[in-house]
Image (cartoon, helix red, strand yellow):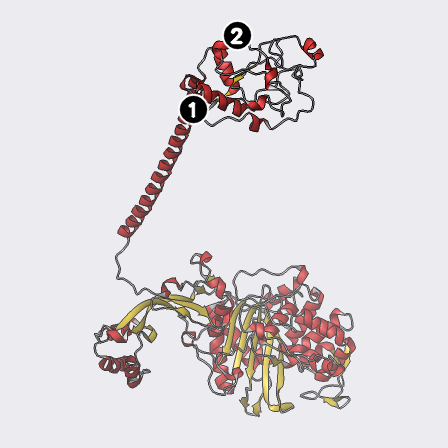
């Protein structure tokens, strides 16, 4: 066993001699002073071998006082070689056994080196964890030495530490277990509450028959109602039934086919029999049936004939406002539900808005007045019959806001059974064609008022400016003439009143094509209208790409540019409302535009109103005059294009006007396609003979509905005194 001496002893000298004396002795082992320590372990040859530079015979005698603690030879161990703590502990345990039955001794690698401790020259420090390692269950060597010096059992202290560590780990585990149990309990309670709540809802609901499970369960038929400005219902969803068959469940397919053909005359019994037996498992018979038809089918008594609930779009007014509403049809569908989608008119244009659940059932309120719509439709239908016209269109618009109170196109259709084009029928001749908003026509002399407005607005002329109207007028290879004889010179006002093509052409040439095109563009006559109709977006006016001088001439009196009657109504509203452009709309609640919408000045607008009133009192529109309502307007007759030219016996006749002219409230447009008035002087095609009388009839019926009463002459004079127009002129 090797023993290190107590304080003051030299670990390299077994005699305990002073280090200074040993330093002078050449036989003494080399050493450096180190900290006082005492370590016991069995002596090993490695302590004396050549690797240590020592001879085992030089160890000398051992202190006899310590013989009782030694179980082997003692040898001095110089500190020049670092101690291998794990090996020391292992050798100690091998010779003595664990102290007090405890764990093997291990050195504390974290114990600090004593202050002032010296390191032998040439010694290289090793990793202390490797040199002074200790087992997982052993006490650290420093703790062991400190415990023994204090009279404490180190193994008992280590055991207490391990017990404390185990108790802490067990407490943490118990805490985690409690949280898991709480979370699991909460999940069970939540699941039970969900099931209980669902059971409560089912118990409180009304019992109903099981429905056929299919893709239709996800189809929504929600669609908002549509009303006129007064709340009159125009479109609504109503519950109906669909009829379908499961052929494999049918008892007598032949008998069912025969009886179905009697209930629905459009079905063929033989065809149904063949379809019932061709192996299919599902067969549509009718997408929608009436309650009476359902009862008759139910009486057939075949279990293979089944019904599904759904909704369909219904239009209570039938043909009334057909071109405004357009119609709807089924989109995605199943036996218990069908998606309703718009196929034309406002139903198609505002399809997404009508199907939006955010509306919460609120109806879509239109600007139409159903009473006015009916009156306008009746007048135009009577006019078509009287004048044997192919078609007709009528518009009544609020001149201040652009709200459309009536929009009629004839022939019309029933949106409940919207027809499908067939054969080689031209689109413009089919009933679903909207002549008021979709049809593009050369609108004739109704455009002359725009030429007059341009001249006044640009300061090139006024109402009393004299214009050369001597005709015919020749421009290169073209000849421009008037429909009747005109004086050689006329005022600009009379050019409009008498509708002189020659005078208007010369005025337009004075203004020039750039100014003309600019004004027409600002009036909205060169682009589609932003009205809420799916067809209107495709109705872009037609005009020449090269705006030449001959184009300036012809467009000035309404040829060479095609627009819709609704375009014309919007432009006339600007002419008479003080000069502000209004966009036509079918939605109620529109407000008058601001100054940013100004196209012409108020002075120019006032001058145009005077000219338009003169057309009705003294010019080509006399047949439209309605006493007391002070209508002003302009006739327009345009020959239809045919074979590269124009057909004199086929015309589009139009009257565009506003009333009452001293304070315009409404713009009215009536257009006939190929109308002919039979008079005692023979057939007459100009608008003054066809469209003008229809306007008079329409105002006579519509004005009282709108709450307007005829004005007396005294009232007209009062309006004049207040700065209004001379209404009786």
The circle on residue 408 is none
Residue pointed to by mark 2: 64
Percent position of residue 306, x then y = 27, 71
What residue would you read off at disc 1?
162
* Element type at mark 2: helix
Q: Where, by quadrant of the figure, is residue 519 drawn?
A: bottom right
Q: Looking at this rendering, what residue extends furthest in the front direction?
A: 57
Residue 372 lies, in percent from the top left, at 48, 70
Q: What x and y, as percent, mark residue 489?
A: 76, 83
Relative to 293, residue 706 above or below: above
Q: Is 505 situated left or right of 395 in this image?
A: right
Numbered disc 1: secondary structure: helix
Between 563 and 712, the one lying in front of the other is 563
Using a 10 Å C-alpha cutoff, classify the residue at mark 2 as few (fewer than 14 neighbours), some (14 to 19) or many (20 or more): few
Q: Is there any visible trace of residue 564 in the rendered image?
A: yes
The residue that appears at 54% across and 71% down in the rendered structure is 396
Residue 630 visible in the picture: no
Q: CA distance from mark 1 to mark 2?
A: 41 Å
Q: Are marks 1 and 2 in contact (CB under 8 Å)?
A: no
Residue nearest the observer in this picture, 623 or 468: 468
Measured from the top left, where is residue 368 in percent x and y?
A: 50, 67
For the image, the number of numbered tags is 2
Q: Residue at x 48, y 85 (%)?
A: 385
Position of 518 relative to 424 (above/below): above
């Amino acid at each position: 066993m090797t023993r290190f001496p107590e304080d003051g002893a030299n670990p390299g000298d077994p005699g305990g001699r002073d280090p200074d004396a040993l330093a002078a002795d050449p036989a003494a082992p080399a050493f450096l002073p180190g900290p006082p320590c005492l370590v016991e372990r069995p002596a090993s040859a490695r302590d004396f071998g050549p690797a240590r530079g020592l001879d085992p015979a030089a160890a000398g005698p051992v202190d006899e006082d310590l013989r009782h603690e030694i179980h082997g030879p003692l040898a001095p161990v110089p500190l020049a070689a670092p101690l291998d703590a794990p090996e020391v502990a292992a050798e100690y345990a091998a010779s003595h056994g664990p102290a007090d039955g405890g764990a093997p001794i291990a050195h504390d690698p974290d114990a600090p080196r004593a202050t002032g401790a010296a390191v032998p020259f040439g010694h290289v420090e090793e990793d202390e964890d490797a040199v002074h390692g200790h087992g997982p269950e052993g006490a650290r060597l420093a703790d062991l030495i400190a415990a023994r010096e204090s009279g404490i059992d180190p193994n008992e202290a280590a055991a207490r530490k391990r017990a404390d560590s185990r108790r802490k780990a067990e407490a943490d585990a118990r805490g985690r277990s409690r949280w898991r149990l709480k979370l699991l309990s909460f999940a069970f309670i939540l699941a039970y509450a969900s099931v209980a709540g669902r059971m409560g809802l089912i118990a409180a609901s009304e019992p109903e028959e099981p429905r056929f499970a299919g893709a239709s369960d996800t189809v929504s038929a929600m669609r908002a109602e549509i009303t006129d400005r007064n709340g009159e219902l125009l479109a609504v969803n109503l519950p109906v039934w669909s009829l379908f068959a499961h052929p494999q469940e049918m008892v007598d397919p032949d008998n069912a086919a025969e009886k179905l053909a009697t209930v629905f005359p459009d079905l063929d019994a033989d065809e149904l029999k063949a379809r019932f037996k061709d192996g299919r498992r599902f067969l549509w018979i009718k997408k929608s049936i009436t309650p009476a038809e359902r009862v008759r089918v139910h009486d057939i008594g075949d279990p293979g004939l089944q019904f599904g609930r759904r909704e369909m779009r219904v239009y209570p007014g039938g043909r009334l406002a057909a071109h405004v509403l357009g119609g709807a049809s089924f989109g995605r569908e199943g036996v218990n539900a069908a998606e309703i989608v718009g196929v034309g008119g406002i139903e198609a244009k505002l399809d997404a808005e009508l199907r939006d659940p955010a509306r919460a059932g609120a109806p879509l309120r239109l600007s139409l007045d159903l009473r006015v719509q009916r009156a306008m439709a009746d007048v135009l239908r009577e006019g078509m019959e009287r004048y044997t016209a192919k078609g007709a269109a009528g518009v009544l618009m609020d001149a201040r806001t652009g709200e459309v109170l009536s929009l009629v196109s004839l022939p019309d259709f029933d949106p409940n059974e919207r027809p499908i084009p067939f054969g080689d029928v031209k689109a413009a001749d089919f009933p679903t064609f909207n002549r008021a908003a979709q049809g593009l026509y050369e609108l004739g002399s109704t455009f002359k008022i725009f030429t007059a407005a341009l001249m006044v607005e640009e300061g090139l002329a006024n109402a009393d400016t004299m214009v050369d109207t001597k005709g015919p007028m020749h421009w290169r290879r073209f000849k421009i003439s008037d429909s009747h004889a005109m004086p050689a010179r006329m005022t600009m006002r009379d050019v409009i009143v008498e509708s002189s093509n020659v005078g208007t052409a010369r005025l337009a040439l004075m203004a020039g094509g750039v100014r003309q095109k600019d004004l027409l563009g600002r009036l909205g006559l060169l682009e589609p209208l932003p009205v809420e109709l799916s067809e209107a977006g495709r109705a872009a006016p037609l005009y020449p790409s090269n705006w030449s001088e001959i184009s300036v001439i012809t467009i000035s009196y309404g040829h060479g540019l095609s627009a819709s009657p609704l375009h014309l109504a919007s432009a006339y509203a600007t002419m008479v409302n003080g000069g502000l452009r209004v966009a036509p709309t079918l939605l109620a609640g529109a407000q008058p535009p601001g100054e940013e919408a100004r196209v012409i000045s108020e002075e120019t607008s006032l001058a145009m109103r005077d000219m338009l009133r003169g057309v009705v009192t003294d010019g080509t529109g006399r047949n439209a005059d309605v006493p007391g309502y002070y209508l002003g307007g302009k006739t327009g007759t345009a020959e239809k294009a045919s074979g590269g030219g124009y057909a004199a016996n086929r015309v589009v006749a139009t009257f565009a006007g506003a009333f009452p002219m001293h304070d315009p409230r409404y713009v009215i447009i009536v257009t006939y396609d190929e109308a002919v008035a039979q008079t005692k002087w023979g057939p007459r095609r100009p608008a003054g003979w066809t469209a003008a009388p229809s306007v008079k009839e329409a105002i006579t019926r519509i004005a009282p509905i709108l709450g307007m009463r005829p004005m007396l002459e005294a009232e007209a004079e009062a309006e004049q005194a207040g700065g209004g127009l001379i209404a009786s002129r």
